[in-house]
């Protein structure tokens, strides 16, 4: 839509100026949408950076993964401190646990386990990957069991026992062995790659 406004100049003649209000409004809307999208992207990147920061700041890749393992233990502590009336809290903590373990699995499966295979530990890497499948099974079962049920907290405790065994195998045997076999340069590259993978899914 085009609108025309008429005014008189000093000599009394009419002068007309045209402006296209529709075009102007569309420009404002498009600018606001682009600005909103840019803010949304920045907010997403900021959230991802916050989620990945504890891992990225922990040091070498094995220290970073150990930090994530400790964070996982703390979530289990929080879950086990709830009772059957705390259904909302249990669901929120389970969602948090699932997200943290999913990110952790991506880091290990896409970077660390392939590095284990490269140094001749294919069977160990395959076993760890298989155990991640059981982690997913536990999460599925917990999501499909009422959180107020005694079966739910019993399954949480079994899950914790199994995952702590998995984490100890990594922390005490496999990760120190892998780090020792790699050069400082390769360990640094592995750390950067792992953080990159974690950031993608943070």
Image: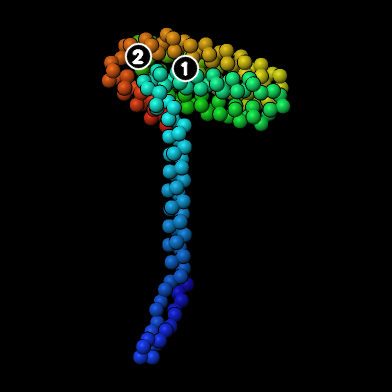
Question: Residue 52 at x, y = what percent?
Answer: 44, 30
Q: Which residue is mark 1?
A: 129
Q: Is residue 28 above or below residue 34?
A: below
Outermost bottom residue:
12
- Residue 46: name its quadrant: top left
Please provide percent x and percent y for residue 128: 47, 14
* SS category of the residue bearing label 2: helix
Q: Secondary structure at mark 1?
A: helix
Q: Is residue 201 visible?
A: no
Residue 191 pos. (x, y %) = 35, 23
Density class for disc 2 (Cα within 10 Å; few <14, some 14-19, many ≥20) is some
| Image location of residue 113, percent across then percent down | 40, 18
Q: Nearer the viewer, residue 112 or 100?
A: 100
In this picture, residue 115 sits left or right of residue 163: left
Task: Choose top left, top right, bottom left or bottom right for residue 2.
Answer: bottom left
What residue did someone put label 2 on? 179
């Amino acid at each position: 839509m085009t609108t025309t406004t008429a005014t008189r100049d000093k000599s009394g003649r009419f002068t007309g100026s045209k402006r296209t209000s529709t075009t102007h409004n569309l420009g404002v809307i498009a600018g606001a949408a682009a600005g909103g999208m840019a803010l949304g992207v920045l907010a997403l990147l900021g959230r991802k950076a916050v989620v990945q920061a504890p891992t990225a700041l922990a040091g070498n890749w094995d220290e970073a993964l150990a930090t994530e393992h400790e964070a996982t233990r703390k979530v289990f502590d929080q879950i086990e401190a709830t009772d059957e009336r705390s259904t909302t809290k249990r669901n929120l903590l389970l969602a948090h646990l699932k997200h943290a373990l999913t990110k952790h699995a991506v880091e290990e499966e896409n970077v660390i386990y392939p590095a284990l295979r490269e140094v001749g530990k294919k069977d160990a890497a395959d076993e760890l990957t298989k155990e991640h499948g059981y982690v997913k099974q536990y999460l599925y079962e917990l999501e499909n069991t009422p959180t107020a049920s005694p079966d739910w907290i019993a399954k949480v405790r079994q899950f914790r026992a199994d995952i702590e065994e998995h984490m100890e195998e990594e922390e005490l045997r496999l990760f120190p062995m892998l780090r020792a076999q790699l050069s400082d340069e390769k360990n640094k590259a592995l750390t950067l790659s792992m953080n990159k993978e974690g950031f993608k899914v943070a």
